[in-house]
């Protein structure tokens, strides 16, 4: 998360000294105009003419010797006003800067340069049709707030340029799916109060065109463009206006001006206070409604008002909350099944025969185990692991197998049903053909100084680099990502070395004799102490590497220079997820699939780096340790993220209010109240997605070891939805509304995780848990001698899974400490399936080992094929877009085209009629004298 310090990270690659040379926005003016319509939409002649008009407006400014700057106006005393002082022109955006003439440490040269750039920028805004009004801060007279208003003509021009869809006529088609009437009594208290938040009216829409303005549903020019659309248009303009043209070099963009300190902030306004309605009766007070029906704790059980979220914050934030809400709903089913499997294991732990044998003083208490490290480790009795074996019975049960199969099907159902829900939202929110509207990023346009021929249009267009230049950039970016992944792997190796080293210390320091009464002996074995401390250190290293790599990933992506904002976010998403995947999951993969698998046997152990003896698992396997690792990482991550999301912005806003306490009794305007909130940052939503996808990985990849993972995720997500809603409505400035058709690159990432999860869970059950060896023993080796095949038993399983080793066969460097009191015992036991000493094939794997290996491989193949078959059948049976949604999309497209065609025919008929009348008048006038 950490959104408050990340808003400038987007500019890290671009940010340099804002001098005459070396700027991301430095482009020779002779090579590239301010807006290149061909770059935006080369196929549209109408838009090209519009772009040329904008360019000509800007070029006319270059001949003007003086700047046109906004006039200063006094605050009119209306704290909730969203208008200029005249009360007519709406504030669409606010720019904030610090007056250089009133700074304490006034550096004349630097401040004068900044002032000139700002004046040039504001003058260019005015020349491009925007209207500005400046007002000094009520609390700090050094701050100046420049309010920006876009008149009707500017809005229409850029709405056409940006291909914004606007209403044609009210939509009389039914677009919402109503709940079954029999359940209305149950769902009524889950829905938002419709007397507060009224359903939005539906319209047929089409991309706006000025020459067909009469076709659009314009009842009031002031409300035709809603506040979100107005802010999006103004931000588009602000991002492309120049602020410096010197030495044939141009620089432009509000992002660069903010990151270089020329402006302190740029943001659209909230429409009111979140606790109270606006005093203006014409204001809908949407922020207040969102807080009351969405962000307030008492609304935690209610459905989200997605249409209002989309209307106020834009489709991009709306689709995130729709996905998060749907994911949380689906987790409810997974959590119920997971809790049922956990309870099954918990209630049947007393019937766990092999755990009883471990805890039995006459069985486990008499089994002497071999030392698990060299020199300092001691011989120990098996019943020291009694408590851990009882816990293991809860998670390593038949219910775990059922739950792993269920989750393989659940994740497919979730992804397929989400696709259908997403298609419905695309239709309802009018983003079906969104990809045609997206514009290039200003940073991309600034680098377009190479001319190439477009393969489709066969016309010239400008690109930022050649094919070879792009290949070099991709190679450098890939190398950087690979280096950081190798760095994570190195950190994992460091954790492994820590485990190997500290296990020796715990084995030497913790009590050696088990008396059954000491709580330290009961719960804190050397294996448990090593596992817990290593998991905590691993979590700390994960968070540190995350903080560093986030900045590195943004720098790499900026260097790569993607064309559109969607391309930028998708590229950053893949880099960040690849890193996070290795960072978060590598330690879990090590415990699940590597620890205890390559240890040799006491007479010939395997060593790491020729020095450290490989770790061994408990006699019951490494499943309990994997569960511990998952619990610490999932729980620690959730707690840390909530602290960041709730406490950090609240404390920062509190400190900001404390700094202005001297003027707290003064009435502050809406723009100044919003300025003292925290900036969300362009990548704020990206980190929200990343947090949830990492959680999704924990819930699916390793769920066979921790059936309660979906329950923890469900509780976290219920809070996450409301925490995100609370901070957006109360602690953060309003974000610039953005369009989005879907959740972007996160969808294929989830599909990849779902496929990988089947393999990991099958391998966890086969290789990490002890389920397959128990089943093999039960069905193949536990038949009583008298041949009664109806009475299978698990008696003797522990003795069967522990091989015998002669202590005289220890090598000198691996002989353990005998302080335990080995007495007259000449042998010790270890976890493996090998022949005993004295056998012709002593210490070689026995027949039971090969039976178990064959059973494990057969289980993995069968489980994978069964689940994959079910997954592919579900994917085939459930279409991505429902039949009704497809019909509605086609129907609306047909009616829209028909409406536009009919209106066009009416105009043509009307013009023909007028022309016919004029022709008739002319003919009649010319013929009349001849008749006379």
Image (cartoon, rainbow, N blue to C red):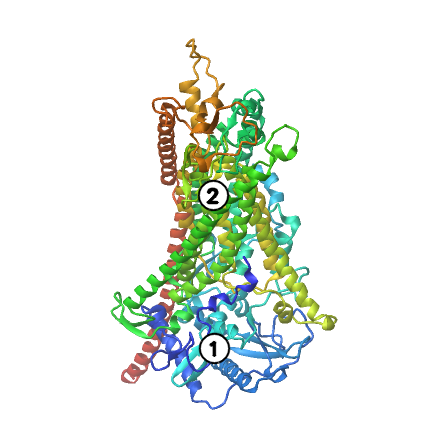
Residue sitting at x 32%, y 80%: 922
The image quarter in which residue 604 lies:
top left
Task: List x then y, in percent, for residue 421.
Answer: 46, 47
Give 854 or 920, whichever is nearer the viewer. Answer: 854
Q: Is residue 842 left or right of residue 116?
A: left
Report the front residue among 256 and 400. Answer: 400
Q: Is residue 13 above or below residue 602?
A: below
Q: Quadrant of residue 884?
A: top left
Which part of the image, by quadrant, shows the N terminus? bottom right
Confirm whether residue 666 shows in the render: no
- Dot 2 falls on a residue whose secondary structure is helix
Q: Which residue appears at 62% of the width and 52% of the height?
A: 293
Q: Quadrant of residue 444?
A: bottom left
**How far from the left and from the top, in percent, is residue 206?**
42, 62
Q: Name the N-terminal-most of marks 1 and 2.
A: 1
Residue 435 in picture, x, y percent from top left:
39, 60
In the displayed structure, 236 sits above or below 637; it is: below
- x 53%, y 48%: residue: 325
Can residue 90 be seen from the camera position used here?
Answer: yes
Question: Are there few (<14), some (14-19), or many (20+) residues within 10 Å of tag 2?
Answer: many
In the picture, measured across the screen, residue 529 lies left or right of residue 777, that is: right
- The residue identified by callout 1 is 17
Q: CA distance from mark 1 to mark 2?
A: 44 Å
Above-or-below relation of 478 to 586: below
Dot 1: what SS?
A: loop
Image quadrant holding the C terminus, namely bottom left
Residue 855 is tagged as none
Q: Are marks 1 and 2 in contact (CB under 8 Å)?
A: no
- Residue toward you, 649 or 813: 813
In this picture, residue 864 sits left or right of residue 630? left
- Which numbered tag is attached to residue 588? 2
């Amino acid at each position: 998360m950490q959104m408050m310090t990340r808003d400038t990270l987007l500019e890290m690659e671009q940010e340099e000294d804002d001098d005459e040379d070396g700027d991301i926005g430095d482009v020779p003016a002779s090579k590239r105009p301010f807006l290149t319509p061909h770059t935006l939409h080369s196929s549209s002649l109408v838009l090209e003419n519009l772009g040329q008009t904008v360019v000509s407006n800007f070029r006319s400014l270059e001949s003007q010797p003086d700047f046109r700057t906004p006039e200063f106006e006094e605050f009119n005393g209306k704290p909730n006003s969203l208008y200029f002082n005249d009360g007519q022109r709406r504030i669409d955006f606010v720019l904030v800067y610090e007056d250089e003439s009133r700074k304490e440490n006034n550096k004349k040269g630097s401040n004068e340069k900044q002032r000139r750039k700002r004046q040039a920028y504001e003058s260019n805004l005015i020349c491009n049709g925007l209207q500005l009004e400046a007002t000094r801060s009520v609390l700090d007279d050094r701050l100046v707030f420049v309010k920006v208003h876009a008149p009707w003509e500017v809005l229409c021009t850029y709405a056409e340029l940006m291909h914004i869809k606007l209403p044609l006529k009210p939509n009389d088609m039914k677009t919402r799916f109503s709940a079954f009437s029999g359940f209305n009594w149950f769902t009524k208290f889950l829905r938002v109060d419709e007397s507060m938040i009224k359903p939005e009216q539906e319209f047929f829409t089409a991309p706006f065109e000025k020459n067909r303005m009469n076709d659009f549903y314009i009842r009031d020019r002031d409300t035709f463009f809603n506040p979100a659309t107005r802010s999006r248009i103004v931000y588009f303009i602000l991002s492309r206006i120049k602020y410096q043209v010197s030495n044939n070099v141009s620089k432009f963009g509000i992002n660069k001006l903010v990151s270089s300190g020329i402006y302190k902030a740029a943001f659209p306004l909230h429409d009111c206070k979140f606790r109270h309605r606006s005093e203006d009766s014409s204001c809908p007070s949407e922020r207040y409604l969102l807080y009351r029906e969405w962000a307030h704790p008492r609304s935690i059980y209610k459905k989200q008002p997605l249409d209002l979220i989309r209307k106020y914050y834009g489709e991009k934030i709306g689709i995130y909350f729709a996905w998060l809400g749907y994911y949380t709903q689906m987790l409810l089913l997974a959590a119920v099944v997971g809790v049922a499997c956990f309870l099954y294991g918990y209630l049947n732990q007393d019937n766990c025969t092999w755990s009883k044998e471990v805890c039995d003083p006459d069985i486990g208490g008499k089994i002497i185990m071999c030392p698990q490290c060299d020199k300092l480790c001691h011989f120990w009795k098996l019943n020291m692991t009694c408590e851990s074996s009882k816990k293991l019975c809860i998670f390593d049960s038949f219910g775990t197998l059922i739950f792993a199969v269920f989750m393989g099907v659940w994740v497919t159902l979730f992804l397929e049903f989400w696709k259908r829900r997403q298609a419905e939202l695309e239709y309802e929110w009018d983003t079906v053909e969104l990809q045609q509207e997206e514009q290039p990023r200003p940073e991309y346009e600034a680098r377009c100084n190479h001319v190439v021929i477009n393969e489709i249009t066969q016309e010239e267009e400008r690109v930022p680099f050649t094919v070879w230049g792009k290949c070099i950039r991709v190679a450098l970016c890939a190398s950087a990502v690979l280096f950081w992944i190798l760095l994570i792997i190195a950190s994992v190796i460091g954790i492994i070395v820590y485990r190997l080293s500290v296990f020796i210390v715990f084995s030497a320091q913790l009590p050696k004799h088990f008396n059954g009464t000491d709580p330290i002996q009961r719960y804190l074995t050397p294996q448990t102490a090593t596992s817990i401390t290593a998991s905590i250190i691993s979590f700390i290293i994960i968070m540190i590497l995350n903080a560093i790599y986030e900045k590195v990933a943004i720098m790499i992506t900026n260097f790569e220079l993607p064309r559109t904002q969607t391309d930028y976010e998708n590229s950053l998403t893949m880099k960040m997820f690849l890193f996070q995947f290795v960072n978060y999951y590598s330690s879990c993969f090590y415990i699940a699939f590597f620890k205890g698998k390559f240890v040799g046997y006491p007479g010939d152990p395997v060593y790491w780096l020729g020095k450290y003896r490989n770790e061994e698992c408990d006699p019951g396997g490494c499943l309990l340790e994997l569960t511990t690792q998952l619990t610490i990482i999932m729980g620690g991550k959730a707690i840390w993220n909530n602290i960041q999301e709730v406490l950090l912005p609240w404390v920062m806003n509190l400190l900001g209010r404390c700094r202005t306490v001297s003027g707290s009794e003064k009435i502050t305007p809406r723009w100044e109240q919003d300025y003292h909130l925290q900036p969300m940052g362009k990548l704020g939503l990206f980190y929200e997605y990343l947090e949830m996808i990492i959680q999704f990985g924990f819930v699916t990849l390793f769920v066979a070891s921790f059936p309660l993972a979906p329950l923890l995720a469900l509780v976290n997500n219920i809070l996450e939805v409301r925490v995100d809603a609370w901070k957006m409505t109360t602690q953060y400035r309003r974000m610039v509304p953005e369009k989005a058709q879907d959740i972007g690159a996160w969808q294929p990432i989830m599909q990849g995780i779902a496929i990988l999860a089947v393999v990991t869970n099958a391998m966890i059950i086969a290789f990490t848990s002890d389920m397959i060896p128990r089943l093999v023993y039960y069905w193949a080796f536990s038949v009583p001698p008298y041949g009664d095949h109806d009475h299978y038993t698990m008696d003797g399983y522990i003795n069967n899974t522990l091989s015998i080793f002669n202590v005289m066969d220890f090598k000198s460097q691996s002989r353990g400490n005998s302080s335990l009191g080995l007495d007259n015992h000449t042998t010790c036991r270890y976890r493996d399936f090998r022949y005993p000493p004295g056998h012709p094939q002593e210490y070689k794997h026995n027949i039971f080992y090969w039976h178990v290996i064959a059973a494990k491989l057969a289980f993995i193949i069968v489980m994978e094929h069964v689940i994959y078959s079910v997954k592919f059948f579900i994917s085939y049976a459930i279409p991505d877009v429902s039949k009704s949604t497809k019909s509605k999309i086609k129907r609306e497209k047909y009616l829209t085209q028909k409406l536009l065609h009919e209106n066009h025919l009416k105009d043509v008929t009307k013009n023909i009629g007028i022309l016919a009348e004029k022709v008739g008048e002319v003919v009649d006038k010319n013929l009349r004298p001849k008749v006379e």
